[in-house]
Amino acid sequence: MDRRRLHSADDGRAAAPAPPVAPWAVPWQRITVGTPGPEFEARPPGQYAFDFPDTECDGWSTSSLCLRFASVRGAKHRYYRQPRQDAARAAVHEESGSIVFAVADGVSSASSSELGAVEACRSSVERMLYLLSSGEGELDFRDVVLHAAERLRQLAMWRLGGREPEAGEVAGLYATTLVAGVVRPDPAGPTAELCRIADSVAWVLDRSNGRYQPLFSSKTGSDTLLVSNEVTPLPHVPEVLEHASVRLESGHALLVGTDGFADPLGDGDGQVGALFAHHLAAPTSPAWLAHLLDFSRETFDDDRTLLVIWRQMGAAAE
Amino acid sequence: MAETKGVLLPAYVLADESGSMGPYKEELSNGLISLCEGLRAEPMVAAKLRLAVLGFSDDVEVRLAVADMRHETSLPQVEIRGLTNYKAVFDDLLDRIPSDIQWLRGEGYKVHRPVVFFLSDGQPTDRGAWRKPHGRLTDRAQTPTAPNIVACGIGDAQARTMVEVATRPEFAFVAKPGTDIGRAVAEFFHALTASLVASGQALNSGSPQLVVNRPEQFSMAIDEVG
């Protein structure tokens, strides 16, 4: 490094005028949809929540699939000094070229739900990678969610100093929703298989017409009179697991999101749906997805997480 | 279809205006003012609530129609009058709640199950006539928009009656024996404001839930009955 340049102002020489701001350096303005929510500087979460940053994003592509995800802290948590309680994780299964992923929404009444959400994602991704390497055929999603539930139990046991926790204690610490799944490359078009616990949601976005096809039922569908608040999150594993599978046709993208995104999206036929259909027509940068997801809209102040997988245009099967 | 504008919690405060509340009118008015001010101080929470205040005695009078407290400038005014007709309350809510929810949905909102905060200082003067409309109101098969009811009794209101009015035993409270009624009214509104703020914070989350805080100087009515 040329140290003289750092000290030029102290050399008695006139400081060089600041270079003009390049137009591309203009800061991104927060996107508003309809009536915006209140604007304020985010407050810090509690001092021990440093491992759960306000915003996370990731993105990469294989030869046949493209992945992006972003997770942003909601206005409510930014204001009331709580960490982001959503999480997402994704990995490529190198042998098959499949992408495994998990999206979780920690239950706010659980005292460490931010950790519960991350651990549910981590453990389910690990388990799916293991199962993919172990055999052919459909993934055993019950095995995946039981593995995630067991991880939460182990965490609770550690937290309780080695004492065996009761189910209620595990839930009180780490309860979380979960959507876990895999997208496998296929000559006929990639196939997605997913399961879910509680109310996180997944859709296929048809980029040709901007329509969102839900893969699971929604708590806020247009035909529901009242919004249901009866979700049973992990560590509870229901007898019958909700499961969906779909082939991604040309022009389709798979979207998996928490209710912080699903609620303002609704049926997808409004401004939020149009915004995302426009920007997700092609893979965007991970940072832009996070910025997009951080849109401001009155009353929608929950954490938001969205994971998107596109089929690569003209990609050959791996 | 119009886009969802938000998901709201409709909240109804049922304030007993019967003659026996006369000595506590000031506490009742002050409590309502503190409730309104408390919600205005939490605009992010208030945005997700719609508050109605109804005074009841022989009938029900609207003191504040379903309002967005961020923008509401008037304060509810109570009037002391008449007897303690519980039937009038539940007949009124049977009409009012489905109609309000239909209106809110028409405005483009989704709606959580409504909550009713019921404060009374006396036993029902309509004897048992209130039980039939109450049963219909709280039966989710008959009334899909059936509210959760939190019942707080002060003065002559009995624990057993509050347990019957509330939709869950843990939603029923009575002022502890010997508690000053004026103070109990104030505590009811403190707890009500805290419950609405906490419930508002829990809305639009992975587990939206009704948070009910026990007012200071109150005990759970089920404990008194048991």
Image (tube, rainbow, N blue to C red):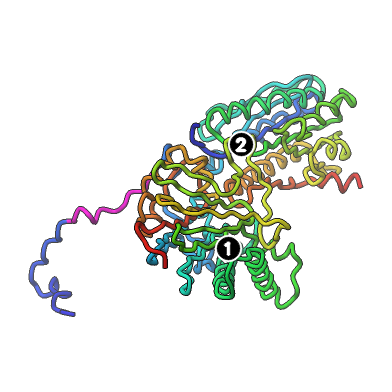
* Circle 2/circle 1 CB separation < 8 Å: no
User: Which residue is nearer to you in this view: A74 or B155?
Assistant: A74
Please name the residue that numbered disc 1 is placed on.
Answer: A117
> Residue under mark 1: which chain is it in?
A
Please name the residue that numbered disc 2 is placed on.
Answer: B111
Q: Main secondary structure of the magenta part?
A: loop
Q: Position of residue B190 (x, y in %)?
A: 67, 43
| Labels 2 and 1 share a subunit | no
Amino acid type of disc 2?
Val
Mark 1 secondary-structure assignment: helix
User: Which residue is nearer to you in this view: A143 or A178?
Assistant: A143
| Residue occupying image coordinates x 50% and y 54% | A247
User: Which residue is nearer to you in this view: B65 or A293?
Assistant: A293
Residue range in magenta is: A21-32
Q: Looking at the rendering, in which quadrant would you find the N terminus of chain A?
A: bottom left
Asked whether residue A158 is in view, the answer is: yes
Asked whether residue B34 is in view, the answer is: no
To which quarter of the image does residue A106 belong?
Answer: bottom right
Q: Position of residue A238 (x, y in %)?
A: 71, 57
**Distance from the alpha carbon under mark 2 to that under mark 1:** 27 Å
| Residue occupying image coordinates x 66% and y 29% | B53
Amino acid type of disc 1?
Ala
Image height of A72 relative to A222, above or below: below
Left or right of residue A28, residue B170 in this image: right
Left or right of residue A248, residue B172 in this image: right
Q: Position of residue A250 (x, y in %)?
A: 41, 51
Left or right of residue A197, residue B153 in this image: right
> Residue under mark 2: which chain is it in?
B
User: Which residue is nearer to you in this view: A179 or B86?
Assistant: A179
Q: Is residue B73 magenta?
A: no
